Image (cartoon, rainbow, N blue to C red):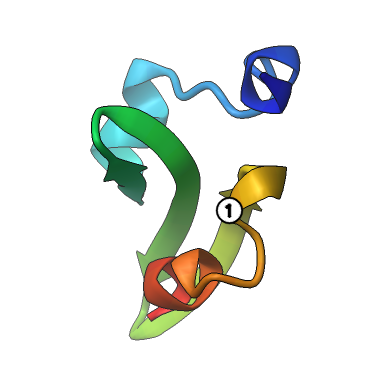
């Protein structure tokens, strides 16, 4: 699975989980995508947004971005 090949780049440390917002999209126990956002001074910065290639063009990224 492509997500396995990107595991290191898409992994989160304790600091990431404490200082940013992370959400995962899943279906039937399979991870379809992940998003990481940092909110500071009322502004949000998109740090990561990844969707498993087979889940592209099915609304997964749109839901994560929202």
Residue sitting at x 34%, y 85%:
42
In which quadrant of the rendered view does residue 57 lie?
Answer: bottom right
Query: Residue 35, how many percent across, how many down?
Result: 47, 53
The residue beneath circle 1 is: 55
Q: SS at mark 1?
A: helix
For residue 14, side relative to residue 8 (left or right): left
In this picture, residue 24 sits left or right of residue 11: left
Q: Residue at x 66, y 46 (%)?
A: 54
Compared across the picture, whether 56 is left or right of 41 comes to right
Q: Quadrant of residue 16?
A: top left
Pick the quarter of the image with the N terminus: top right
Closest to the observer, 29 or 3: 29
Residue 15 drawn at (x, y percent): 37, 26
Residue 33, horizontal then vertical, whole percent: 49, 46
Residue at 47% across, 43% down: 32
Q: Quadrant of residue 45?
A: bottom right
Q: Quadrant of the C terminus?
A: bottom left
Please tell me how many numbered marks the rendered image carries.
Answer: 1
- Crowd class of label 1 (few under 14; some 14 to 19; many from 20; radius 10 Å): few
Q: Point out residue 28 in the picture as x, y percentages from the top left corner.
A: 24, 35
21 shown above or below 63? above
What residue is rendered at 75% in x and 15% in y?
Answer: 5
Q: Is residue 53 left or right of residue 15?
A: right
Please say if 35 is above or below 4: below
């Amino acid at each position: 699975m492509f997500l396995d090949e990107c595991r290191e780049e898409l992994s989160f440390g304790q600091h990431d989980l404490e200082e940013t917002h992370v959400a995962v999209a899943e279906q039937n126990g399979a991870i379809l995508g992940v998003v990481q956002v940092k909110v500071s001074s009322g502004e949000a910065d998109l740090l990561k947004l990844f969707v498993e290639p087979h889940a592209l063009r099915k609304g997964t990224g749109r839901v994560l971005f929202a």
